[in-house]
């Protein structure tokens, strides 16, 4: 159920100083347009990597959309993050094709290597580990994606090795 | 003629390294000053052989497979410089027998007519392949909108998103509702895990989808269009944006388009934000309007009250891509393919334990066994075929003994699965069907919007039971309990997500009851997947005493000395499987 995600620890809001001015052009672009809430949140997330609390408040003040509506939408969709993320996001695919070809092993191996659980960020903020529903490159299963680069036909050990090598580079 | 070299740059290809292959060929051409045209195309369908490079010269067309950076230079050097094609790397050609020829020959390409044959970022190439001819024909021959709807109706085209509703009927309803403001929406929120048909069409032939939407807008007199596309498909969105701009520049979108007075149309892209339920049409509309994507009661159907409460027509990507072809070739040509009630072709994404995973388009009426064995090349690693999953989380598993089932909406539904949008995930003897059911239920539980109690709570309760079964704590009447919950959820949910969520469980119980019983009554997982039901032991013949398992065991259940056979203490073992995945000598046995 999507609503449970509100209670998740990862969705707790963190106070972080951000440059509020960055978002002004976005607000003027969408202000007053119908159906603007999701593009506003998407734009904000693109800018800051997540949606800081101060941005929610600013968006609400300037567009008149109630905070409750914004929070309702932001917690409904899987895309929105309310906490900062690491420099690199590792998306481990758990689509059907990957699942039947042991995607679980990839996730477990990465959890162990990075010492984080699914959805968490490493202490040095270098990696965020996430499982996703389907990346759409089923023929390469099991797959993970780091940034824009996809890595296919993995084993747990290979995935761990790739992650270690990127960090060293 | 000039020789052309075409590189397949769809998402799959890029993931497999086609971008690097392309750059390598480009550099090599410049350095060696070679004379050939280098082109880009999108998904050719043969995902299992990516990266793909096609060379066309005066002797014919050759498709090379598995061409990584290093091989790229070798192929160009030999084929173009020395005019000596490398037969070992050629996967398909008209000229001689090649390993994958039959993969292409058994297909009928209507939706995928341009995918892999043209540069998706070029409107000129689309027009050269009959692009925008359908709408131009409508404009020049002054075909009335009612006739267009009639043609689509007679072609028998049914909604390819999975619902299977007659497209022409949908258009008829939207047309019948008069309003100065109407909309056409393209549903490109392909959320099914294991399905990538729509992504491939959008990446490979975005203009055909636009043209289909333009024709639909003409037929129902819509003035606004929205493409609701998953944000997880960045390349599809990029190519759609390029296509939209080109169409605007050519005057194919805007005011009085194609010289039809009063025909104004604008289309924009709305990026989804990651919610499976938004594939349901009323939830999709809520999401376009900027709300939480929760379905509402129907009627009123979107054809009466849709986006911004105006009459709206929603079709899937593949449905729209069919439309221009039908207008050009006539409904008779389309209805020639298929069965009595399911006409035309269907695109399938083959994935899982299949040898040739990729994208295929087959005429309706082909048997599922033929799709898997003739086109898909059978099962990987010589394992035994067990079942195929159709329709994703809303569908079900069709077992091996029903592989004569034909591809047709009604025949597939009769098995308990659904045709769905076209994801076909093949499973072999090493797949546990209870685990598969659990996987899908976990997905639908997470994606349930929470509106209906039966879907919200029922899926959670069913998942708890399945977890219990796969953990070796199943109770005797668990199967009955699952079935009764399943029917309650089906009967008491508002939208398609809830109504179909129990299908994976129901079909696996129907066809693989023995596996459920083995888990519950004998605490055994026949496919050796559910870890808590397995016993890990050391193969005394193979163990080299390397101590890797011993060091990695989190509970210190393994004892032994260097170069001596190790031992797992079953009383301490938590069955986490670490030893099994770390062992390099396959000396941990599962039983």
Image (spheres, coloured by chain):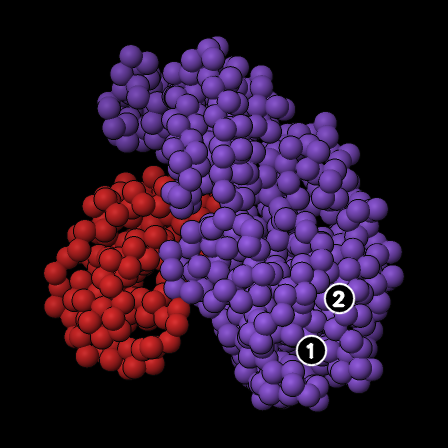
| Whole-number angstrom distance, CA of label 1 to CA of label 2 | 24 Å
Residue B58 visible somewhere in the drawing: yes
Q: Residue at x 63, y 49 (%)?
A: B162
Q: Is residue A141 above or below residue A147?
A: above
Q: Is residue B500 above or below residue A163?
A: above
Q: Which mark is residue B149?
A: 2
Tag 2's secondary structure? helix
Q: Residue at x 51, y 45 (%)?
A: B495
Answer few, some or many: residues within 10 Å of disc 1's Cα (few below 14, many 20 plus, some between 14 and 19).
Answer: many
Spot the purple chain and give its letter: B
Of the two numbered discs 1 and 2 on the same chain, state the one appearing first in sequence: 1
| Horizontal side, residue B261 vs residue A73: left or right | right
Percent across and percent down for residue B81 are 69, 77
Percent across and percent down for residue B118 are 68, 74
Res B562 quadrant in image: top left
Spot the red chain and give its letter: A
Answer few, some or many: residues within 10 Å of disc 2's Cα (few below 14, many 20 plus, some between 14 and 19).
Answer: many
Res B514 quadrant in image: top right
Tag 1's secondary structure? helix
Mark 1 and mark 2 on one chain: yes
Q: Which mark is residue B126?
A: 1
Which chain hosts label 2? B
Which chain hosts label 1? B
């Amino acid at each position: 159920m999507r609503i449970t995600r509100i209670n998740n620890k990862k969705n707790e809001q963190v106070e972080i100083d951000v440059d509020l001015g960055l978002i002004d052009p976005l607000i003027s672009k969408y202000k007053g347009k119908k159906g603007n809430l999701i593009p506003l949140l998407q734009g904000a997330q693109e800018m800051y990597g997540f949606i800081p609390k101060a941005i929610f408040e600013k968006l609400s003040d300037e567009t008149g959309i109630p905070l409750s509506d914004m929070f309702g939408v932001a917690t409904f969709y899987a895309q929105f993050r309310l906490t900062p993320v690491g420099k690199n996001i590792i998306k481990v695919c758990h689509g059907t094709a990957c699942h039947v070809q042991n995607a679980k092993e990839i996730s477990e191996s990465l959890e162990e290597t990075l010492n984080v659980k699914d959805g968490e960020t490493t202490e040095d903020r270098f990696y965020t580990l996430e499982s996703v529903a389907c990346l759409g490159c089923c023929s390469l299963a099991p797959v993970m994606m780091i940034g824009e680069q996809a890595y296919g036909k993995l084993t747990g050990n290979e995935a761990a090795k790739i992650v270690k090598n990127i960090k060293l580079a | 003629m000039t020789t052309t070299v075409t590189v397949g740059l769809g998402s799959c290809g890029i993931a497999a390294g086609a971008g690097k292959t392309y750059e390598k060929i480009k550099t090599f051409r410049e350095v060696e000053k070679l004379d050939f045209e280098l082109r880009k195309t999108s998904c050719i369908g043969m995902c299992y052989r990516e990266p793909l490079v096609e060379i066309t010269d005066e002797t014919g067309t050759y498709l090379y497979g598995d061409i990584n950076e290093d091989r790229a230079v070798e192929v160009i050097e030999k084929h173009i410089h020395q005019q000596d094609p490398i037969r070992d790397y050629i996967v398909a050609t008209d000229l001689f027998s090649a390993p994958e020829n039959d993969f292409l020959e058994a297909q009928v390409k209507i939706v995928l007519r341009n995918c892999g044959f043209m540069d998706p970022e070029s409107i000129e190439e689309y027009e050269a392949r009959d692009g925008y001819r359908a709408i131009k024909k409508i404009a020049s021959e002054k075909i009335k909108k009612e006739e267009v709807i009639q043609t689509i109706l007679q072609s028998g085209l049914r909604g390819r998103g999975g619902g299977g509703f007659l497209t022409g009927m949908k258009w008829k309803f939207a047309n019948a509702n008069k309003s100065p403001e109407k909309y056409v929406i393209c549903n490109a929120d392909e959320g099914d895990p294991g399905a990538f048909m729509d992504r491939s069409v959008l990446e490979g032939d975005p203009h055909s989808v636009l043209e289909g939407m333009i024709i639909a807008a003409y037929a129902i007199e819509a003035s606004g269009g929205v493409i609701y596309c998953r944000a997880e498909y960045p390349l599809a969105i990029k190519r759609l944006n390029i296509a939209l701009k080109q169409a605007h520049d050519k005057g194919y979108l805007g005011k009085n388009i194609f010289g039809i007075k009063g025909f104004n149309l604008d289309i924009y892209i709305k990026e989804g934000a990651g919610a499976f339920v938004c594939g349901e049409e009323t939830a999709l509309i809520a999401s376009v309007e900027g709300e939480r994507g929760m379905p509402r009661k129907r009627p009123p159907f979107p054809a009466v009250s849709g986006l911004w409460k105006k009459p709206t027509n929603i079709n899937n990507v593949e449905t729209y891509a069919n439309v221009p072809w039908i207008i050009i070739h006539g409904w008779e040509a389309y209805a020639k393919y298929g069965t009595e009630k399911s006409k035309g072709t269907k695109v399938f994404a083959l994935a899982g334990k299949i040898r040739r995973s990729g994208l295929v388009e087959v005429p309706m009426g082909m048997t599922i066994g033929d799709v898997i064995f003739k086109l898909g090349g059978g099962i990987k690693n010589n394992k035994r075929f067990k079942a195929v999953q159709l329709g994703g989380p809303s569908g079900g598993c069709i077992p091996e003994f029903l592989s004569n089932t034909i591809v047709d909406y009604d025949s597939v539904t009769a098995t308990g699965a659904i045709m769905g949008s076209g994801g076909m995930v093949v499973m072999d003897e090493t797949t546990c069907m209870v685990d598969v059911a659990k996987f899908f239920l976990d997905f639908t539980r997470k994606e349930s919007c929470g509106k209906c109690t039966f879907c919200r709570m029922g899926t959670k309760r069913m998942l708890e039971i399945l977890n219990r079964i796969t953990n070796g704590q199943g109770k005797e009447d668990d199967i009955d309990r699952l079935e009764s919950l399943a029917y309650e959820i089906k009967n008491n949910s508002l939208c398609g997500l809830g109504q179909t969520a129990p299908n994976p469980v129901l079909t696996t119980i129907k066809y693989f009851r023995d596996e459920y019983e083995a888990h519950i009554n004998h605490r055994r997982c026949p496919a050796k997947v559910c870890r808590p039901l397995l016993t890990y032991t050391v193969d005394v013949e193979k163990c080299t005493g390397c101590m890797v398992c011993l060091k990695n065991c989190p509970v210190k259940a393994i004892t032994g000395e260097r170069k001596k056979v190790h031992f797992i203490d079953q009383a301490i073992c938590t069955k986490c499987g670490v030893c099994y995945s770390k062992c390099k000598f396959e000396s941990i046995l599962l039983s």
